[in-house]
Amino acid sequence: MGSNLRHLYEFGHFKLSEMEGLISKEGHVVPLTPKALDLLLALLKGHGRVLTKQELLDTVWPGIVVDDNNLPTQIATLRKAIGPGYVETVSRRGYRFAAEVREKWEDLASPSRPPEDAPANFQTLLKITDLVEVASHPGRIAGRPFVWALLAGTALAVLAMIGLAFRHHGGARQPLARTAIGRFLARATSEGGSFREIKLDHVPSELLITPDGKKLYAFEYYSRLITVLDCSSLKVKSIITLPSTPQSAFMTRDGKRIYVGLLVDGVMVVDSEHDRVLDRRLPTGGTVFGLAVTPDEQKLFLAMGSAGLKRLSLGTGKSRLLSEVACPVSVGIHPDGNELYVSYQCGGPGGRSGHDAVEIYDVNSEKTLATVNGPPMVGGVVSFAPDTPYVLLPGRDACLAPKYDHVGCLSVPSTVYHLLNSADHKVAKTLTMPWEEMMGVFAPAGRRIVFSDKFVSVVDPLRDTLLERYSRVGERYGRAAFAPMGNRMFIPVSPTGLLVLDTLDQRCLPPAQGLFNLYSGDGTLDDERQAQPLVSEGGIEFAPGLIGQAFRFNGKDGPLRARYWGACGGCDASWSESLYVKFAGLEGEMTILERGHYERDPEHRLLKSGNNRITLETGDRLTPGPSISSSGPISAGKWHHLAVVTQGGELRLYIDGNMTGRVKLPPIGTFDASKVPGGAYVGATHKGTNFLNGLVDELAFYNRALSPAEIKAAYELTLHGPCSPSQTQ
């Protein structure tokens, strides 16, 4: 069935939603234990057939040996809840459902209004303020239906609507990556590359990976299934069926257990060494929207929505209410194990609508250390940067949704996040993005953040630079998870299941020493070194390139312009330019790069001539200088590496790793800022002529002279060696 349909069973005056695992009678939720509900569902799916005791045991308690009295006890519970005449005992054979059962599928494609059969107390429950609007509900992958039945019964059930947005990305602490990790998206977005996809029956809401990196657990909070993936073979290892609908999950630091917060009541434990559900249920008294376990596995902290914040002792089973403040939706423990971060909606302690609070507790004393409130913020999942002091606080749509006051927003509309310094509990930096990326998580080593929703975006938070960005039509992306070494990233994707991306080896990237700025073309005009972003003066697009994506020029309009500092303006007597180019056609003269003229920098232009030679023209416009050209013609559809090096009073041109020629720097004419624009132009002259038809990738400016060996290595590694597209996929 399509993802916008809800499967219902109807009998008598009852309705049972298989998706939510809830049963109602005339619009009112019928309280039923999870096992009794599972038993009812099994009987309904039997369509009047007699089910043996063993069949029911295998269905309701899969893989678990239970007492002989369990089944009769749950049958009695079920009959008491729904009344007599529905469940029939067939002597010496088993049980069957005796009443007429009707199946139907309900369209939930338009969640802007309640379904006609919403529970009778629905309108009253909606009066609770500061709920996340359904239309902008960012925690769901696109196309997933909104679960109206969650809103039935009590105000706590209403808060389930909020809870769907916020999943704790907990789990074992990921160690610092031991190898230099390159770009996350480059291998998949390069020419010949593709995202590896794992087809799943459900789109994961949350991913947990064991500390040894061997297994991944994919949770889907609309079902009871956990998909266990072998991270080496990328094959599904097993499917775990939970006895009740999950709402949150947390993996212990050693990776041996997963604590699962349930939608109705309680916490289940999954033995992740043997991939089985333990026959142990910790009562909580309500929905568990978020949970976190201390490293010593002695305490369990629970975000309980309207029931506040609780602590459960795993040794004694005793619980303590830490705060009665409503709407905690996520909890997380800092990697050092000493601080608990509690993210609220509905304002939280000292907060208000659109300015929700984050409260910080001492894990040992369970006393409040600090409260963060005031910045524009809508509560969600907190992410920690391993081995750095930074904590990522989601502001989400606080600067985007019209219902908020947008006080303190740096720009509107935008998605907002805050970097908190855990040393002093103060906001160190606010990140704003013009696109909707509602989920963010630190990558291992804490130097990059991966945001996801409509796009997958990789950001350097300290430089405030967009490093990579990608999307495909019709897809939405969930919160990323990383292999412990940081060399592989998993991303939930709707509608297919799971994307797997292996990071590029950093050796395949341009040399870092003396790199003044780098324009990678990976879906962004930003400079990796934060010198200055490129300015598009036309219809620049991105296309699969040599390393990740590249800038695509159409041969008709629109160069890219690098301002003065963006083109290493003011660099000393030794500097270099490096790039890769591929021509889509060879008609006419095409400008690859034109460098502006400054008091100390001569002008030059790198181009493809009319006779299909790579040419370097020198001199300023008033006093043309000598030129260098390749000895033979180049061809279309082939990547070439070009480098221009200035050293010792001369310019040198390198083509495909070899020096083609050198010329003395020509005399510098009079600088006239009114006639000569600054910086550099890529893909055309400053006058908008000689447009490039093709791709440019890895445009780099150095404040030193690259050595012949470095230039040769860049050509060999990327075009013919282990970093070539054919080798990196």
Image (tube, rainbow, N blue to C red):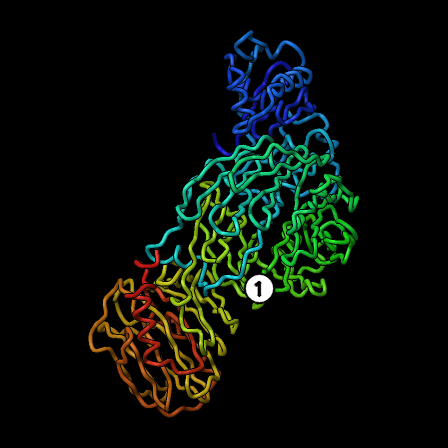
User: Of the residues shown, which amino acid type is indicated by label 1?
Assistant: Pro
**To which quarter of the image does residue 193 belong?**
bottom left
Q: What residue sits 52% from the left and 71% below the top?
A: 530
**To which quarter of the image does residue 230 belong?**
top left
Q: Nearer the viewer, residue 151 or 557?
A: 151
Residue 398, image x, y percentages: 67, 53
Residue 693, image x, y percentages: 32, 64
Q: Residue furthest top?
A: 91
From the viewer's perspective, is residue 51 above or below residue 352?
above
Residue 482, image x, y percentages: 50, 53
> In screen coordinates, is 31 left or right of 554?
right
Q: Nearer the viewer, residue 674 or 523?
A: 523
* Residue at the disc numbered 1: 461
Q: Is any atom of residue 528 visible in this view?
A: yes
Q: Quadrant of the C terminus?
A: bottom left
> In screen coordinates, is 138 left or right of 127?
left
Q: Nearer the viewer, residue 192 or 5?
A: 192
Q: Is any atom of residue 400 visible in this view?
A: no
